[in-house]
Image (cartoon, rainbow, N blue to C red):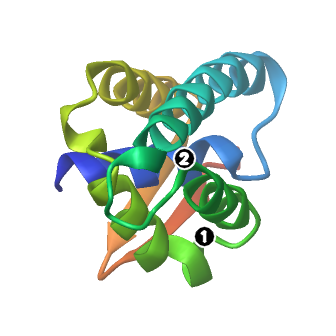
Amino acid sequence: MTEVELVATALAAGAAPGLTGSGRGAVHDLYAALREAVRRRLAESGGNGVGVGGGYGVRVLDAYETDPDVWRTRLLQVLTAAGVETDEESLAAARAVLRAERRTGHITVDADGTTGVLLETDS
């Protein structure tokens, strides 16, 4: 998994419905920090000449939150163009979201560009 894919997977995991209890609060707080770091990076990339302008990149980020399957490819493109793979703040926040999300009993799956969350249930 590349650094850009790591960020996209963490964004999808943090926005996923179904998290409950105290784990939800921890993941939500970490997700909010990740989302803000990525938003800043996308906004800062507006003048880099690669056509992802801050407004467009942020709109893709917002759309990805509502439908990750549809917007994943476009998000990967804007994250790459914005240089997220070198943004330590975004990478650290993404790793923190995924660690917290694993501790809540959810498993993130990323196969062939599809991201989902499997919920562990008590039998």
Q: Are marks 2 and 1 in contact (CB under 8 Å)?
A: yes
Where residue 22 sits, quadrant-wise, is top right
Q: Residues within 10 Å of mark 2 (few under 14, many from 20)?
A: many
Q: Is residue 48 above or below residue 117?
A: above
Q: Is residue 64 above or below residue 3?
A: below
Left/right placement of residue 13 relative to residue 21 reads left
Q: Position of residue 78 (x, y in %)?
A: 41, 62
Q: Position of residue 122 (x, y in %)?
A: 70, 44
Of 55 and 21, the residue lying toward us? 55
Q: Is residue 87 above or below residue 51?
A: above
Mark number displayed over residue 81: none
Res. 5 visible in picture: no
The residue positioned 82% from the left and 23% from the top of the image is 21
Of 23 and 61, the residue lying toward us? 61
Q: Quadrant of the N terminus?
A: bottom left
Q: Position of residue 76 (x, y in %)?
A: 37, 65
Left/right placement of residue 72 relative to residue 85 reads right
Q: Is residue 102 above or below residue 74?
A: above
Where residue 40 sits, quadrant-wise, is top right
The residue positioned 70% from the left and 73% from the top of the image is 67
N-term-proximal mark, 2 vs 1: 2
Residue designated by label 1: 68
Residue designated by label 2: 11
Q: Secondary structure at mark 1?
A: helix
Question: What's under tag 2, amino acid-wise?
Answer: Leu
Question: What's under tag 1, amino acid-wise?
Answer: Pro
The residue positioned 69% from the left and 22% from the top of the image is 23
Q: Position of residue 72 (x, y in %)?
A: 48, 73
